[in-house]
């Protein structure tokens, strides 16, 4: 639109008899520019996320066991991930390579040891195949895990673990069946006496439940901020379901709350454990700061996270 504007400005200077026409056209273009500018001005692109655990102050002071994690993004997708210890030394790195409908991510730790994950997606961005490779520092990469997802016409997803020696053989008693609700979100999973379920209000998860046999054993409630998430950060249902499927038998009950289309505020389970997320938002509803406090499932969540946009 800037090129068009310059051309019309040149015409206005050289052809006086088109002054009125050019003025009308220019006004029209300026209106279009205003709409485009307004749209772009309301959307920010995530560039970097810095997380300090347990806090920025303690990490800066070099407190033992504190660490810093930095994630870099392109088009709102993470492309690099580095963790530093209290002395500023790199302890872990993770790289992300997007090729067409596939993603390869490599988690490197202890210099030469790593885990490599390969994810393949279908045309609807649904996870269909995932493989895991590892190297314990020996220099030899080993094929560790392979699972495939099959999408049924009955609003179901079947996840099967395959043999790494013969990919036509399903490993016994590894099959997980996921069921989708009317909006296309996973709301239950079952596998050989173990089941989980997710309750929703619309597309917002509100409660997670684990059941062994006939006995309900674990319940986790989610609370979210009323602040609406910007449209370019909202997770499609396929992306949300992928988060769950990647967790396989261990349903990522906390990750799913942090990867849905709402800002998580509080997690509270039936064991009395509580994690809170105190967030700060800018005028466009993008989160700029988050402080997590609490303990859950043998994990301490105390941290401060800073978000940077373009």
Image (cartoon, rainbow, N blue to C red):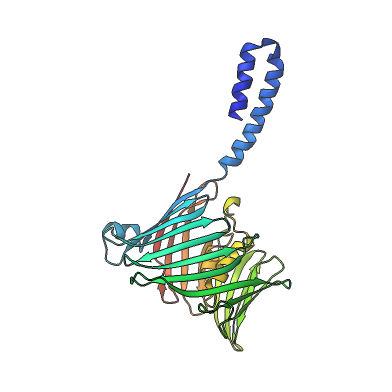
Q: Position of residue 169 (x, y in %)?
A: 58, 81
Q: Is residue 225 above or below residue 146?
A: above
Q: Position of residue 10 (x, y in %)?
A: 60, 17
Q: Position of residue 99 (x, y in %)?
A: 53, 56
Is residue 18 shown to the viewer in this render?
yes
Asked whether, in this view, residue 110 is left or right of residue 100, the answer is left
> Which quadrant is the N terminus positioned in?
top right
Q: Residue at x 41, y 65 (%)?
A: 107
Q: Position of residue 195 (x, y in %)?
A: 60, 81
Q: Measured along the vertical axis of the image, is residue 287 above or below residue 63?
A: above
Q: Nearer the viewer, residue 219 or 98?
A: 98
> With respect to residue 263, does 192 lie above or below?
below
Q: Quadrant of residue 301?
A: bottom left
Answer yes or no: is residue 222 visible.
no
In the shown orientation, is residue 71 left or right of residue 98? Answer: left
Q: How many marks?
A: 0
Quarter where residue 201 is shown? bottom right
Residue occupying the point 47% across, 52% down: 73
């Amino acid at each position: 639109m800037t090129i068009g504007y310059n051309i019309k400005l040149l015409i206005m200077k050289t052809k006086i008899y088109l002054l009125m026409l050019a003025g009308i056209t220019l006004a029209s273009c300026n209106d279009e520019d205003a709409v485009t500018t307004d749209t772009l001005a309301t959307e920010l692109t995530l560039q970097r996320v810095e997380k300090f655990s347990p806090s920025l102050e303690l990490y800066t002071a070099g407190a033992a066991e504190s660490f810093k994690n930095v994630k870099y993004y392109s088009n709102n997708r993470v492309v690099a991930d580095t963790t530093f210890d209290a002395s500023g030394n790199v302890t872990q790195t993770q790289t992300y390579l997007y090729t067409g409908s596939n993603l390869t991510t490599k988690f490197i730790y202890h210099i030469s040891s790593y885990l490599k994950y390969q994810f393949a997606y279908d045309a609807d961005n649904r996870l269909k195949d995932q493989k895991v490779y590892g190297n314990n520092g020996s220099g030899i990469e080993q094929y560790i895990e392979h699972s495939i997802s099959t999408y049924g016409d009955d609003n179901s997803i079947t996840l099967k673990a395959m043999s790494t020696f013969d990919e036509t053989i399903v490993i016994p008693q590894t099959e997980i069946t996921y069921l989708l609700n009317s909006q296309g979100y996973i709301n239950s999973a079952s596998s050989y006496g173990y089941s989980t379920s997710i309750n929703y209000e619309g597309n917002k998860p509100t409660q997670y439940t684990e059941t062994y046999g006939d006995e309900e054993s674990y319940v986790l409630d989610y609370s979210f901020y009323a602040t609406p998430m910007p449209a370019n950060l909202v997770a499609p249902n396929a992306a949300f379901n992928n988060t769950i499927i990647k967790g396989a038998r261990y349903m990522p009950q906390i990750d799913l709350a942090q990867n849905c289309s709402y800002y998580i505020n509080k997690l509270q389970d039936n064991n009395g454990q509580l994690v809170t997320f105190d967030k700060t938002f800018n005028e466009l509803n993008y989160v700029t700061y988050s402080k997590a406090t609490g303990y859950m499932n043998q994990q301490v969540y105390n941290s401060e996270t800073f978000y940077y946009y373009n």
